[in-house]
């Protein structure tokens, strides 16, 4: 049963809603659909699931792009209504005929809806009956028995089953199961009864040659014995690797590039003062606006490699008069070329596919303007979509939030999470340097108690930047270390606590559980996911599973997820900037920082226009 059905414009004006349904929806599924799907260019999906306390809804929708109308149906997820898609298509067709832009009330549409609903339900019922009639017999399966093969009398089974001829076929045919029922030409055989191997060509059963198998195992044992005998010849002798000595080479010197140590054993580390220069976070990036005429020409050439050549007169007439309505077939060549281009820029294939589906859904049915090509229309729609996706829905102003926390006399806590080797500690130091330039007191918390050398690495950064560090060594609970670090920062009056955590793969449940505990226990103000700009399809897997694990393993009813993204190694990818789009699209979190070098000043903001221009170049 439908819970709600309504028709509204893209501007948000509700034109009609079904008064017969009128069920009070729990939560706000329509608003969530608009925010999470329609505005985030996810409208190419077939449905959207919404979970509210005490209810779970499925929402389906369709557009009339020429009139700018949206049709949405809401029903309980457990029902699996088959007629909803058909009903939305009928509503779209009928309502578009009576739609008037100057009219805002359509009370007379109720009777039309009742007729369309009965028609859609009747179609769904007929389809369900026809599907049941065509259902094959061999889907029968009993517990404890497995349907292994079908026997045809006097012929071979083309499905890879077992074939027999003559009397064997009759015997099998007459065979019945334990409950006295037979299943035609099919027989159910218990799994332990099947012995042998099915040969590829003749579909006959051939038994294992045990003698050959024994010979093979004997041969393996002999070789193992030879190896073991050779290894026990001289157990006391230890083989060591010797350095290669070249001709006319100078005397060997130990290569040691670590910091010098004084007589007391303390390292002499250079202190980095604030004169290294201004951080790139505070420098505005200027993007030149070049003409995109050549790009449009290239898109037009690439988008129709297989299309038939039209006459010059028909092409000219179509460009002047404009096409009546854009159809999916018209958009496919340009969208395919655009999808390939996004994938070459390191956008995950799944994300590129969804984006193109969303663009097709938003353009299908629209009228092409005069002197406008399909490729340029698709390109403009994609550019708008990319800008909308990469522009953060909520502003993360760290300096403003730091001062707000300072007024409440508590430190602002930032937790850095991510997979192994992406540069969490290095970029944490860059963020610390940027905050120091804005006269913010910072304290580091070494909560990577898992990786060897992690505490020493963070200690080196703290000495260079002359900021305090809270550490408890290794093999400690990182959640407790972070909690004590926040308490220490509160006593010392530090404004910001930067928490470094161990790198962990998204499938490592023990480490993900420890991270979920750290976030739940300390309730940080910002959770930053540190990811490489080098990743492609793996960016989707990393972020989605990090969010999923944080939600599943948290003991809080409202678990904390990733708030922002720090994109590292951005200087190594040239124009392969697609990881930024993939990460933002999957998580909905904005890119807060971009690491673009190895010095403390190499940290900048994400320039949305530059990314979009590079993606579509």
Image (cartoon, rainbow, N blue to C red):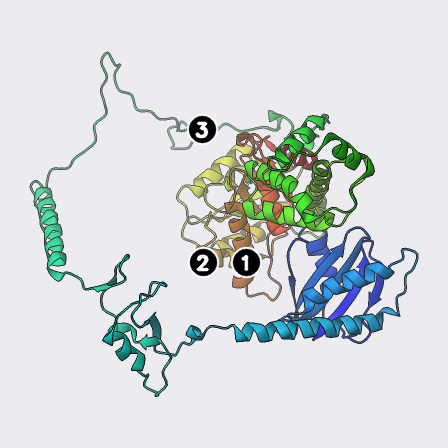
Tell me the distance, in whole angstroms, between the alpha carbons under discs 3 and 1: 44 Å
Camera-side mark, 1 or 2: 1
Which residue, as the protein is rendered here, is positioned at the far right?
Answer: 102
Residue at image x 40%, y 76%?
A: 141
Q: Earlier in the sequence, mark 1 or mark 2?
A: 2
In the picture of the structure, the residue carrying the numbered disc 3 is 268
Rendered view: 590 above or below 373:
below
Instruction: Pick the residue in front: 295 or 118.
Output: 118
Of tags 3 and 1, the one toward the viewer is 1
| Between marks 3 and 2 in the image, the one whose residue lies nearer the viewer | 2
How would you rate the neighbour count of disc 3 (Cα within 10 Å): few for under 14, some for 14-19, many for 20 or more?
Answer: few
Q: Quadrant of residue 336?
A: top right
In screen coordinates, is 138 left or right of 338?
A: left
Residue farthest toward the top in the current orientation of the protein = 248
Q: Which tag, 3 or 2, sits closer to the chain's start? A: 3
Q: Quadrant of the C terminus?
A: top right
Where residue 251 sits, quadrant-wise, is top left
Mark identifier at residue 548: 1
- Tag 3 and tag 2, C-beta contact below 8 Å: no
Mark 2 lies on a secondary structure that is helix
Q: Where does the image place residue 487, in percent across and percent down from the top left?
A: 58, 53
What residue is disc 2 on?
A: 509
The one of 209 and 94 positioned closer to us in this rendering: 94
């Amino acid at each position: 049963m439908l819970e709600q059905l309504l028709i509204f414009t893209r501007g948000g004006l509700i034109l009609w809603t079904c008064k017969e349904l009128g069920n009070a929806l729990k939560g706000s599924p329509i608003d969530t659909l608009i925010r999470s799907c329609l505005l985030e260019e996810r409208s190419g999906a077939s449905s959207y699931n919404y979970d509210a306390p005490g209810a779970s809804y499925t929402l389906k929708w369709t557009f009339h792009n020429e009139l700018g109308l949206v049709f949405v149906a809401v029903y309980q997820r457990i029902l699996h209504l088959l007629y909803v898609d058909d009903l939305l298509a009928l509503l779209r067709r009928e309502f578009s005929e009576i739609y008037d832009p100057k009219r805002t009330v359509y009370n007379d549409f109720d009777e039309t809806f009742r007729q369309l609903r009965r028609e859609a339900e009747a179609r769904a019922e007929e389809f369900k009956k026809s599907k049941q009639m065509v259902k094959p017999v061999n889907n029968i399966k009993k517990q404890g028995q497995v349907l292994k093969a079908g026997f045809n009398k006097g012929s071979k089974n083309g499905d890879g089953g077992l074939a027999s001829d003559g009397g064997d076929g009759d015997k099998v045919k007459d065979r019945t199961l334990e409950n006295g029922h037979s299943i035609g030409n099919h027989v159910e055989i218990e799994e332990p009864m099947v012995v042998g191997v099915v040969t590829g060509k003749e579909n006959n059963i051939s038994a294992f040659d045990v003698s050959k198998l024994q010979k093979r195992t004997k041969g393996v044992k002999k070789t193992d014995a030879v190896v073991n005998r050779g290894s026990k010849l001289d157990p006391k002798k230890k083989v060591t690797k010797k350095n290669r000595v070249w001709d006319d080479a100078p005397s060997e010197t130990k290569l040691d590039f670590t910091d010098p140590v004084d007589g007391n054993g303390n390292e002499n580390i250079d202190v980095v003062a604030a004169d290294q220069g201004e951080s790139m976070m505070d420098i505005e990036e200027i993007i030149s606006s070049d003409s995109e005429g050549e790009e449009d020409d290239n898109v037009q050439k690439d988008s129709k490699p297989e299309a038939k050549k039209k006459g010059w007169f028909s092409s000219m007439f179509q460009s002047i008069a404009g096409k009546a309505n854009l159809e999916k077939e018209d958009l496919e060549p340009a969208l395919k070329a655009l999808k390939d281009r996004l994938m070459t820029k390191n956008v995950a294939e799944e994300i590129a596919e969804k984006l193109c589906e969303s663009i097709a859904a938003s353009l299908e049915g629209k009228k092409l303007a005069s002197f406008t090509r399909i490729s340029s229309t698709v390109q403009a729609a994609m550019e708008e979509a990319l800008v909308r996706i990469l522009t953060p829905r909520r502003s993360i102003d760290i300096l403003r939030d730091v001062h707000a926390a300072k007024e409440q006399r508590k430190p602002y806590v930032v937790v850095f999470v991510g997979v192994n080797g992406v540069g969490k500690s290095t970029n944490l130091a860059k963020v610390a340097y940027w905050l120091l330039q804005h006269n913010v007191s910072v304290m580091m918390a070494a909560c990577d108690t898992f990786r060897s050398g992690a505490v020493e690495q963070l200690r080196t950064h703290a000495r260079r930047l002359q900021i305090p560090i809270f550490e408890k060594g290794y093999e400690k609970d990182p959640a407790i270390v972070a909690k004590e670090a926040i308490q220490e920062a509160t006593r010392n009056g530090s404004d910001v606590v930067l928490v470094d955590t161990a790198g962990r793969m998204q499938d490592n449940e023990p480490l993900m559980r420890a991270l979920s505990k750290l976030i739940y226990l300390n309730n940080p103000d910002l959770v930053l996911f540190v990811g490489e700009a080098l990743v492609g399809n793996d960016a989707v897997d990393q972020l989605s599973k990090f969010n999923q694990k944080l939600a599943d393993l948290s003991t809080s009813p409202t678990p904390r997820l990733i708030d922002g993204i720090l994109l590292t190694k951005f200087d190594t990818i040239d124009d392969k900037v697609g990881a930024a789009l993939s990460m933002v699209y999957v998580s909905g979190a904005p890119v807060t920082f971009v690491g673009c070098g190895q010095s403390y000043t190499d940290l900048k903001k994400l320039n949305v226009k530059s990314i979009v221009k590079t993606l579509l170049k």
